[in-house]
Image (cartoon, rainbow, N blue to C red):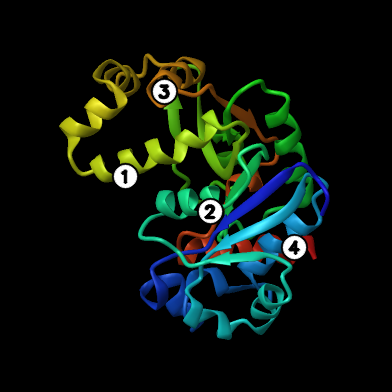
Amino acid sequence: MSGPFQAVVLAGDRGPDDPVARRAGVPCKALVPMAGRPMLLRVLDALAGSGAVAGVTLVGPRQAQLDACPELAQRIAAGELAWLPPQASPSLSAMAALERLPVERPVLLTTADHALLQSAWVDAFCAAALGSGKDAVVGLAAHARVQAAFPQSRRTALRFRDGAYCGCNLFAFLTPAGRRAPAFWRHIEQQRKKPHRLAAALGMGTLLAYLGGWLTLEGGLERLSRRVGARLGAVLLDDPRAAVDVDSVADCELVERLLASDG
């Protein structure tokens, strides 16, 4: 790995109470095997094969859970990747990792449940992010393409006037200003169950425009950029599989089928 990006993988979750982990009989979702290989190792393999990534910081699983995956424990002990304990929320885990990484290096963030992640997607996303001129970038896929590819799968969509999009669990923080995004993310997490405070955090006009279907993707990013204090952008990924992560037992079954067909 010799590229410009430092990668961060978030691998904290709900532990054995997660239905996906419980079904597989493993201590946390990140270690659930997909086609015989823990999904977290599949993510790490994809990052290792990317020409864009120079090193990896893993946030989670908890120390006591590492023994359940000897290969992962060996990689950490050998210094192949840095490990940090997971924090109380994804945004706090992201912030903990960013604090330990040089501010002059761009950072790619993804998640341990992105079991289909491919090195080519990482390379394409990172190249487009670097060329965007933005401070922070999110990876998206067109919802219509995702639904056409996986009509039985329920994927969350962000709906704008000019189209609907699914998240791809790929984020790039390209400048020091871009690293403000996880702090804003934390603020939103804290307010998500308080509608009036959430509206204040996002801006009432922005929230109403989105709910009313008037907001374009670019317009939404511009408004959010002003709130965060950083230039935010989006990169569209062509492959609809990039929008598939493992949030449910049904997702497990879909990913297993896709990996079997690839093999």
Give the quadrant of residue 44. bottom right
Q: Give the crowd class for mark 4: few <14, some 14-19, many >=20 residues within 10 Å.
A: some
Mark 2 lies on a secondary structure that is helix
Q: What residue is shown at x 32% (from left), y 17% (from top)?
A: 209
Find disc 3 in the rendering and name its residue.
224
Name the amino acid, label 4.
Asp
Q: Earlier in the sequence, mark 4 or mark 2?
A: 4
Q: Which mark is residue 158?
A: none
Q: What residue is shown at x 41% (from left), y 73% (from top)?
A: 15
Q: Can you say whether 100 is above or below 87 in the image?
A: above
CA–CA distance between discs 3 and 4?
Answer: 33 Å
Name the amino acid, label 3.
Leu
Image location of residue 73, percent across then percent down: 64, 79
CA–CA distance between discs 4 and 2?
Answer: 20 Å
Q: Which mark is residue 189?
A: 1
CA–CA distance between discs 1 and 2?
Answer: 18 Å
Q: Which mark is residue 97?
A: 2
Q: Is residue 111 left or right of residue 78?
A: left
The C terminus lies in which quarter of the figure?
bottom right
Mark 1 lies on a secondary structure that is helix
Q: Give the crowd class for mark 3: few <14, some 14-19, many >=20 residues within 10 Å.
A: many
Image location of residue 34, percent across then percent down: 63, 71
Find disc 4 in the rendering and name its residue.
45
Q: Please name which of the two marks, 1 or 2, marks the residue nearer to the observer.
A: 2
Judging depth in this view, the residue of 11 and 261 nearest the camera is 11
Name the amino acid, label 2.
Ala
